[in-house]
Image (cartoon, rainbow, N blue to C red):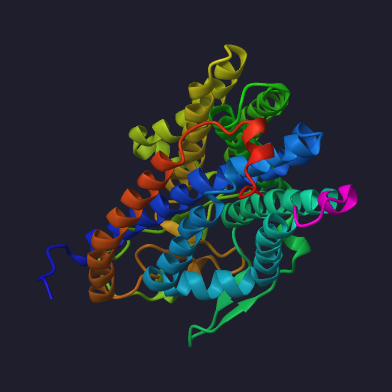
Amino acid sequence: MLPMPFDYETLRLIWWLLLGVLLIGFALTDGFDLGVAAILPFIARTDDERRLVINSIGATWEGNQVWFILGGGAIFAAWPYVYAISFSGFYLAMFLVLSALILRPVAFKYRSKRADKGWRARWDWALFIGGFVPALVFGVAVGNVLVGVPFALDSDLRSTWSGSLLDLFTPLPLVAGLLSVAMLVVHGAGWLSLKIEHGPVLARAKRWGQGAALAAIALFAVAGVMLAYGDHGFRLIGAPDTSGPSNPLYSNAEAAPGAWLENYSRYPWMLIAPAMGFAGPLIALIGIRARADVPVFLGSSLAVIGTISTVGLSMFPFILPSSVQPSASLTIWNASSSAMTLWVMLLMTAVFLPLILLYTAWVYRVLFGRITTAEVRSNSDLY
C-alpha cells in the first residue's frame, strides 16, 4: 500500500470535490438524455421525426448512466451515513426515479418492434416519463436537502424519518424540481443542436430550449431569493473538528435562516458558481437566437456546472442537514468513512476514473456527427 500523503481533513475535502464532479458528470451526460426524452412528444410529430430524436441519444444513453452508478457508489463508500439515511428516507422517491429509469430502456428496446402507431406512441410517452420524472425528482430531492431532511438520530446512531412522500413537495423543492427540468431541457436542446440534421425537428427543439432557458434563469433567481429571505439554512456553531473521527451526533449545527448564502461573503470566489448558473442559460439563449449550434450546448453545460456547484458551495460543509434535529446534521467532517478507506478509494479512483474519461471521450469521438432522416430510414440497426 502506498503511504498516505494527505491528512484526514484533506482527504475529506478531496472526496467532497470528487462527489461534486461525479454528480456534475452525471448531469452533463445523462442529463441531456433526460432532457431530450422530456421534449420528445412535443418536437417530433411523425414516426421518422421521433426516431431521429430517439437515435440522437440511442447510442450513448446506457453508457451515460455509469456516472449515476459512480455517484451512488461514492456516497456509499465515502459517506456511509449519508447513504444510509438518504436512500432509506427518500425510498419512495428513489423507487419513483428507478421505475422511470427502468421504463426507459424497455421503451428504447420495444418501441420499434411493431409498426402500429398506437404501440409506438405509447412507448414514446414512456420515454417522456423516463426523462421528465427523474429530472423533476432529482431537483425536488436537492431542494429538500436545502430545506433540511426530517431525520433524527438516537444515541446508537439509529435514524428515524418523520416525513412522507407528499412532504417532499413543498415550495422550494418544487422550484428546484422545475429548475432541474428546465435546465435539462435546455441541455437536451443543446445536444440536439449538435446531433440531428437541421430541419423542423431541430427548430422546434430550439424553441423549447429557448423557453426553458428563460424559465431556468427565472427559477434560479426565485430559488436564490427563497434561500435569502425564506426560513431555510443551517450553520455550524464554532469551529468543527475537521480531522476528528466521524460522529454525526457531534456536528454542533443549528438552523439559521439565510445561512446558505454566508459562504459567499466568507469566500467571494464562490460567486463564480451562481454567475455560471445565470450565464449558462443566457449563452444558450443567445446561441439559439443567433442560430449558432455549439454555444447552445456549451451554455447548457455551463448552466449544469454552475447550478450544481452553487448548491454544493452554498451548503459547504453540510451534506445532509436535519430539519428536526439540526445537531444530527451530516457534514463532510462528521459523516465520512475512515482516513484509510478514503485513501484506498482515492487510489482506485486515480486509476479507473481516467480510464472511464478516456473511454467516454473515445466513444463520443467515434459517434460524432449528425443523424439524418435518411439514415434513420435506411439503417435497420437503429431504434
Against 166, residue 360 (above or below) is: above
The residue nearer to you, when weighing 170 against 32, is 32
Name of the residue lying farthest toward the bottom = 156
Against 61, residue 346 (above or below) is: below
Please identify the quarter of the rendering in which residue 353 is found: bottom left
Query: What is the x, y in percent for residue 322?
Result: 56, 65
Query: What is the x, y in percent for residue 346?
Result: 26, 64
Query: What is the x, y in percent for residue 50?
Result: 74, 39
* Residue pictured at 73% horizontal, 22% vertical: 200
Residue 230 is at least partly visible in this image? no
On-image quarter of the N terminus: bottom left
Query: What is the x, y in percent for residue 276?
Result: 46, 30
Residue 117 colored in magenta in the image? yes
Please identify the quarter of the rendering in which residue 337 is found: bottom left
Q: In the picture provided, is 344 more to the left or to the right than 192? A: left
Please identify the quarter of the rendering in which residue 176 is found: top right
What span is colored magenta in the figure? 112-120
The residue nearer to you, when weighing 376 against 333, is 376
Against 289, residue 11 (above or below) is: below
The residue nearer to you, when weighing 322 against 109, is 109
Q: In the picture provided, is 50 more to the left or to the right than 4? A: right
Residue 129 is at least partly visible in this image? yes
Name of the residue lying farthest toward the top = 290
